[in-house]
Amino acid sequence: MIASVFGGLRRRPWTAVCVGLLTSVAATAALAADCPGHPDAIGTSRTIVVDPRAHPIIGTMQYNKTLPLADREVVLTFDDGPLPKYSNQILAILAAHCAKATFFLVGSQAKANPEGVRKVRDAGHTVATHSQNHPTGMDRLPLDRSRQEIEQGIASVTAALADGTAPAPFLRIPGLRVNEGIEEFAASKGLQLWSADFPADDWRNVSANRVYELAMQRLEKKGKGILLLHDIQERTVAALPRILRELKVRGYRIVHVVPATPDRPATPTEPQQWQLHPPSEVVATSRWPKVPKFASAGPASLSVPALSDLDWCTTDLGGRAARRGRGVPLPAVAPWPRQTTLPPAGTLAALPVPAASVFKIPESARLTLLASPANLAASTAQARATEVSSAKLAGKSRRPRHAATAQPPASAGETAQAPQSAGATTPKPATQARRNGRSVRVAGLKKR
Ligand SMILES: [Zn+2]
């Protein structure tokens, strides 16, 4: 294999260029030699050896890592086989192109068609696994069930190989429906979890032409990557020859992937090669630098801030108001009272208790407060009229009703303040109260 030729090389910038040139020269030579009778075959340009334990998850459809491919390199993958009717045709098409691929086989299919598994292996493709029964929602299954699916799938394919060898430790979950538990289990088993870089939707009800179009469009967009196909679909059989021909026309190259073994070390790579598009010095990065972590120099014993430190009321609110483009501008001076110095806690108990009369609102004040200016004028006139008529009646009869509607007698403490406050807030109108729809003069003011 070409990869093993360069397996021992340590990559430096100049060696990387040399390796690239040598690889393409060797690949061209290999293609002519490896695919006799098929001058139009795309062939397999190189094989890379990967270590699943070093790179447990790949495929940019779900992860930020993928296979260490160069620009315009493509890895072909086929899921869900073997199904003799179509899988055999896929194998024949690949053979006519000397193109090597990776097959993710379903355990139950392998059990039903063990010969199909061996055909895949004998054709030089990589045999990998895709669960035992292809459950559609493995991410929702209990983890025990998922583990069982994975392990039984491997056991069934191993049994079908029938040569004591196991399939490659490459695993693809049906529908790519993984969860954290599945990822951790796969990693613990040394399995490399394969997603993909782009599908061609060949499992959907679309035409073969659409499969071809999607494969090429999505590949052109990413420039390289893992193509996800299915070898149990008639439309895939119909689309594959055209895809391979077009790949060659557009200058793409097929890369075969095999797992590392004690006898076959992994192809040396740099970490950035496992990214689809490694960051470049000439491409602007959108990642901002991380905020540094500041270490505290000493114990946390900051002093309590003084009230004067919080005197933010002096902020230039007028400036803010001037900058407002619409709406009501803010007042230049904050309307709320400024912070005043509070008396010491010990002096609070010495303040006098306010008398109940402080909170008492005289009737005249209530009238002034509640009435609108227009109503107030009308009420005042009416009050005077009532006062005159009541004065006439006053000398003739004193009914108990007057006493009941009069103000309650003031207490000793109230009498000292009530006249003062009434005099301060009431100009001249007589105080009255409305009761049962009739105006009644207040007894206390009758004598004025
Ligand atoms: Zn599948």
Image (spheres, rainbow, N blue to C red):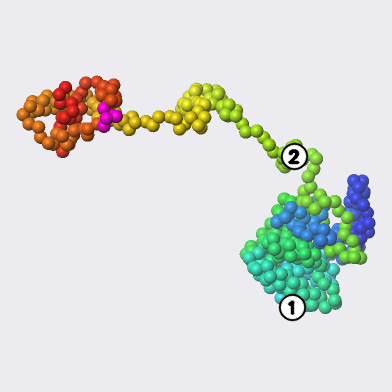
| Residue 162 seen in the figure | yes
Q: Which of 90/275 is in front?
A: 275
Q: Please give left or right for residue 91 compared with residue 336 in the image.
A: right
Residue at image position (64%, 68%) is: 141
| Image quadrant where residue 62 sits | bottom right
Quadrant location of the C terminus?
Answer: top left
Q: Secondary structure at mark 2?
A: loop
* Between discs 1 and 2, the one toward the N terminus: 1
Quadrant of the drawing holding the N terminus: bottom right
Contact (Cβ within 8 Å) of mark 1 with mark 2: no
Question: Does the magenta run of residues contain 444?
Answer: no
Q: Residue at x 29, y 25 (%)?
A: 417
Q: Residue at x 90, y 61 (%)?
A: 265
- Principal SS element in the magenta part? helix
**Residue under numbered circle 2:** 295
Residue 19, given in percent of the width and then of the height, sits at: 91, 52
| Badge number at residue 151 | none
Give the magenta part as a residue range. 411-415
**Residue at left 74%, top 74%?**
152
Viewer-side residue, 330 vs 135:
330
Q: Is residue 65 left or right of residue 448?
A: right
In 3D space, how far apart are the residues under numbered discs 1 and 2 (Cα atoms)?
A: 61 Å
Q: Secondary structure at mark 1?
A: helix
Q: Quadrant of residue 183?
A: bottom right
Residue closer to the observer: 354 or 223: 354
Query: Which residue bears the numbered disc 1?
Result: 111
Identity of the amino acid at label 2?
Answer: Ala
Residue kind at label 1, given as amino acid type: Lys
Farthest residue toward the left?
Answer: 396
Q: Is residue 202 visible?
A: no
Mark 1, other Cα within 10 Å: few <14 / some 14–19 / many ≥20: many
